[in-house]
Image (cartoon, rainbow, N blue to C red):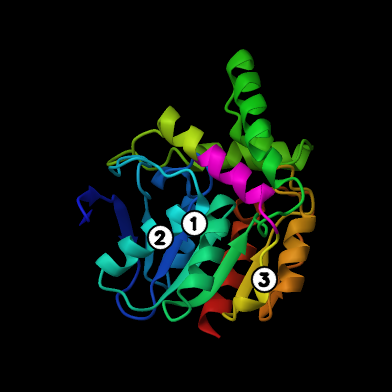
Amino acid sequence: MAVDGVDFVYRELGPEGGVPLILLVHMAGNLDNWDPRVVDGLAAERRVITFGNRGVGRSGGSTPDTIEAMAHDAVRFIRALGLDQVDLFGLSMGGFIAQVIAEEEPRLVRKLILAGTGPAGGDGIDKVPALAIRATINGALTRRDPLPSLFFTDTAGGRRAGRALLQRLKERTDNRDKDISLPTVRAQMKAVKRWGRQAPTNLSAIRQPALVANGENDRMVPSQNTLDLAARLPKSELVPLYRDAGHGAVFQYHEDFVTRALAFLGS
């Protein structure tokens, strides 16, 4: 779909009608980085739209290097679909973007789901790019995908969950998205670092109901940020931190998370 001369790639699943749920993916993620169990589970009851923001995957244009600009692009995409109200599910960097949209476009956003994410200026968020670079280098040296080490705990349960997710991410064999380009990753890393170094924002301005989730041992966005986010958002519901889980907790515990998310959206 073309928006102001830029093509945005997206997928739409689930029944028609109701308030659509827009998914905002993590740093370096494309359409195929969403766990099929989460997307399909949500789409069993909700209209779900995943999309590639500007410069991401097969979407055109250049990726901006601020979270605010990414949020503005997402709003343009949503409005181009003809939608005047949506729910947002933001994972990691997607959660940063969701917070900006909710604050700047209060009439557009009905409810928020924020997973593995934190507020501007949150503890350790500015270190996410360095962690990702180290994991990528180590993955290249060991010929292993870096995603499990970043998203899951280094325990027997965490390693099992990481292997399982990698297998699920291969299930789609047709019409797969394009890999993230190096310029896009660099821009996203700069945006995440800036978000982590910003002055804390006034989250009391976000009045929408928000479901907040994470694992108890998130290496990427330290779990304390999840607790901080839930404490500062006026209408938050905190999912008890998932045991033996990290950044990808909502993938590791996909059955429980989908059940909670659908109940929250439908309440």
Q: Amino acid at mark 1?
A: Glu
Residue 192 painted magenta: yes
Task: Name the residue located 57 percent from the left edge and 67 percent from the top edge.
Answer: 113
Front residue of 100 and 238: 100
Residue, disc 2: 72
Q: Which residues are magenta?
A: 188-199
Residue with the most extreme bottom position: 267
Badge 3 or badge 2: first in the primary sequence: 2
Q: Amino acid at mark 3?
A: Asn
Residue 212 painted magenta: no
Front residue of 18 and 253: 18
Element assignment for label 1: helix
Residue, disc 3: 202
Task: Name the residue located 75 percent from the left edge and 57 percent from the top edge.
Answer: 225
Q: Position of residue 111 (x, y in %)?
A: 52, 76
Q: Position of residue 128 (x, y in %)?
A: 66, 39
Identify the image quadrant of residue 182. top left
Element assignment for label 2: helix
Q: Position of residue 96 (x, y in %)?
A: 57, 57
> Does residue 13 show up?
no
Q: What label does residue 68 carry, if any?
A: 1
Q: Quadrant of the C terminus?
A: bottom right
